[in-house]
Image (spheres, rainbow, N blue to C red):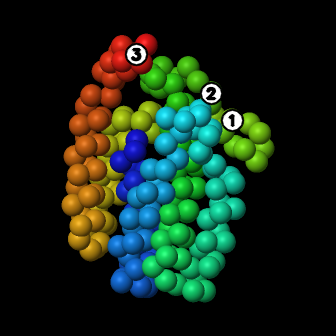
Amino acid sequence: MAFTHALSGAVLAAPVLAVAPELAAPAAVAGIVGGLLPDLDLFVGRHRRTLHFPVLGWALALPAIGIAAVAPTAATVAAAVGTASFAVHAGTDALGAGDEIRPWERTSAEAVYDHLHGRWIRPRFWIRYDGAPEDAVATAVLAAPIVAFYPAPLPAVAAVCVFLGIVYAIVRRRLPPVVEELVG
């Protein structure tokens, strides 16, 4: 779910927090944005294909990480964490279900599209579906180091993500009829 992706992006800033704490906040914010960005394809194109790059995303992230390592500034470090989070998002989508409206029914063999190889990566169901109880637990686990070590306002953002993730997990299985009614 979006909250898990956002916090996983923020957690990617942990090395920055350890090495250059003054750059941790912009890096974590970039990680959150990078973790959310791929899901904009819910609104444009095909979800988990248009803006999801589980393999090719690293072609952008690895040079950005290299540049940040050589010339660490707020901008280069934010770009490194943001692009890494963007790539991680797409890769981790393959660990869950497909992108169908009722993913617990397991009707789709398409988790995320691999543009490099021109094929869909199958779902692994490590997290059964977005909003599953284990997804809410993953969000809470990712929030823990942010709450414990990151500068304000990031702990508050993490706490809000956990709260909203729990609410979403509670209502997730009730959403398909509502979405179908609204979208048609």
Front tag of 2 and 3? 3
- Disc 2 crowd rating (10 Å Cα; few below 14, some 14-19, many 20+) is some
Q: What residue type is labelled 2?
A: Ala
Q: Earlier in the sequence, mark 1 or mark 2?
A: 2
The residue tagged 2 is 109
Q: Label 2, secondary structure: give it.
A: loop
Residue 14 occupies quadrant: bottom left
Q: How far apart are marks 2 and 3 (CA)?
A: 21 Å
Q: Which residue appears at 26% of the width and 58% of the height?
A: 157
Q: Label 1, secondary structure: give it.
A: strand
Front tag of 1 and 3? 3
Residue 181 spot, x, y in % from top left: 36, 13
Numbered tag placed on residue 180 in the rendering? 3
Q: Which residue appears at 28% of the width and 50% of the height?
A: 161
- Disc 3 crowd rating (10 Å Cα; few below 14, some 14-19, many 20+) is few
- Disc 1 crowd rating (10 Å Cα; few below 14, some 14-19, many 20+) is some
Q: Which residue appears at 56% of the width and 79% of the height?
A: 68
Quick check: 154 left or right of 33?
Answer: left
Q: In this view, does 42 lie above or below 181?
A: below
The residue tagged 1 is 120
Q: Distance between the residues labelled 1 and 3?
A: 25 Å
Residue 133 spot, x, y in % from top left: 32, 37
Q: Which of marks 1 and 3 is nearer the N terminus?
A: 1
Q: Is residue 8 above or below residue 1?
A: below
Q: Label 3, secondary structure: give it.
A: helix
Q: How far apart are marks 1 and 2 (CA)?
A: 8 Å
Q: Between residue 40 and residue 23, name the one nearer to us.
A: 40
Q: Between residue 37 and residue 85, name the one nearer to us.
A: 37
Q: Do the residues labelled 1 and 2 touch (CB within 8 Å)?
A: yes
Q: Earlier in the sequence, mark 2 or mark 3?
A: 2
Q: Which amino acid does label 1 sit on?
A: Trp
Q: Is residue 20 above or below residue 174?
A: below
